[in-house]
Image (cartoon, rainbow, N blue to C red):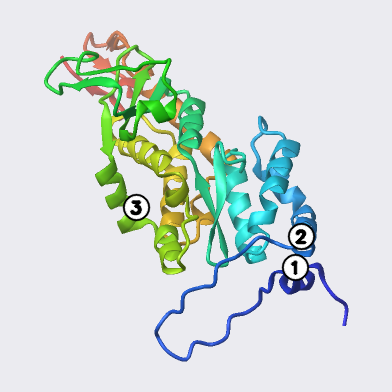
Amino acid sequence: MTETLMSRVLAATGGGRPAPEENTTQAVEPPVGEATPAQVDAVQAYLEKHGAKFRDSLPGHVPYEAFQAAVAGLLPKVAGCTPASLRLALLTCARFGLLPDGFEATIQVQGTKAVFVPTYKGYVRLMYRSGLVASVHCGLVHEQDEWEVRPSTPAPDDFTLTIRPELDEEERGKALFAYAFVVLKNGSRSQVVYVNRAKAAEVRDEWSYGYQLAKQQGREDSYWHRHFDHGMQKTALKRLFPWVPTSAELVALAQADDAGERGDVQIVHAPNPERVALIAEAERAHRAAESSQETTPLPAKRSKQGRTYRGKRQRGGRKSRVS
């Protein structure tokens, strides 16, 4: 029997079909450790076989070579995941045009499954890419910073923050809360959204399957374990959505992110770049059509009998006499 690439990958990673469950109690999946060189080689060959799909998924401004280099850097940590989940996680990442380099996005291990996790910087990148905002501001307020929040005061005096640049992160003290707001194209500023540590922990405990799974396995390597402050900032950005214009791509990113947090499949939420472009073009055409209707009415025509009437173009129906 000929050995296929998939069979080699499954053999190297220990993947395969799960045994039938004998009871309704779900066992905790064993954690995936650092991959062996054989696992890395097998998975890299498997991903290279599907290289054309990654090339097609990436938007034109993201070089395939840069994406490939980012994937190679994270393989030792994720090569032990099931091949199908790793491929889907990377395809989702590619379709949003983000690099899995830990800066814009990362691939997190949940049991034996690979999950695409966009960082708050990935959200910022897509907000700029939408072209709907002039600037995005998302940061942390630390213990040694000087700040004031006065919701009843008109912007921009409702939120002021003064930091001391001479202090490093440790000297600034613990991060107290995250804030997020955008400046729109017309120069106005959106509402400022705040998320403190308690609220971020509440979101983490209620929604993050990866965090709960890591706790069950006695590990502290989930995204929330390692990057709590970043998770706080990402939560602030997502809570900003109702107050700012958002693109179809940005909404889809949040849906994919939420699906990953719940432990659900993410690929169904990733937008097709051509479909997003078509929707945007249709919306522009619709707005143009609406504005073109706000024109001066055509002059009334006069019949041979001296009566005036308006034609079909203006009324949308048969001609009728008006006088």
Could you give the CA–CA distance between mark 3 and mark 1, rounded to whole angstroms? Answer: 33 Å
Locate residue 256, reporting x and y percent: 47, 50
Q: Is residue 295 visible?
A: yes
Rendered location of residue 51, percent (x, y): 76, 50
In the image, which disc is placed on residue 204?
A: 3
Is 115 or 316 nearer to us in this picture? 115
Horizontal side of 100 relative to 24 (left or right) equals right
Asked whether the viewer can see residue 286, the reply is: no
- Residue at 67% in and 32% down: 60
Crowding at dot 3, Cα within 10 Å, few <14 / some 14-19 / many 20+, comes out as many
Most foreground residue, 262 or 150: 150
Q: Nearer the viewer, mark 3 or mark 1?
A: 3
Query: Neighbour class for label 2 at 10 Å: few (<14), some, many (≥20)?
Result: some
Labels 2 and 1 touching (C-beta < 8 A): yes
Amino acid found under the numbered disc labelled 2: Tyr
Residue placed under numbered mark 1 in the picture: 9
Q: Amino acid at mark 3?
A: Arg
Looking at the image, tell me whether mark 2 or mark 3 is earlier in sequence order: 2
- Image coords of residue 218 (percent x, y): 45, 66
The quarter of the picture where residue 152 lies is top left
Disc 2 secondary structure class: helix
First of labels 2, 1 by sequence position:
1
Q: Earlier in the sequence, mark 3 or mark 1?
A: 1
- Residue 264 point in image, percent of width and height: 46, 62
Residue at which label 2 appears: 46
Q: Are marks 2 and 3 in contact (CB under 8 Å)?
A: no
Q: Residue at x 73, y 41 (%)?
A: 69
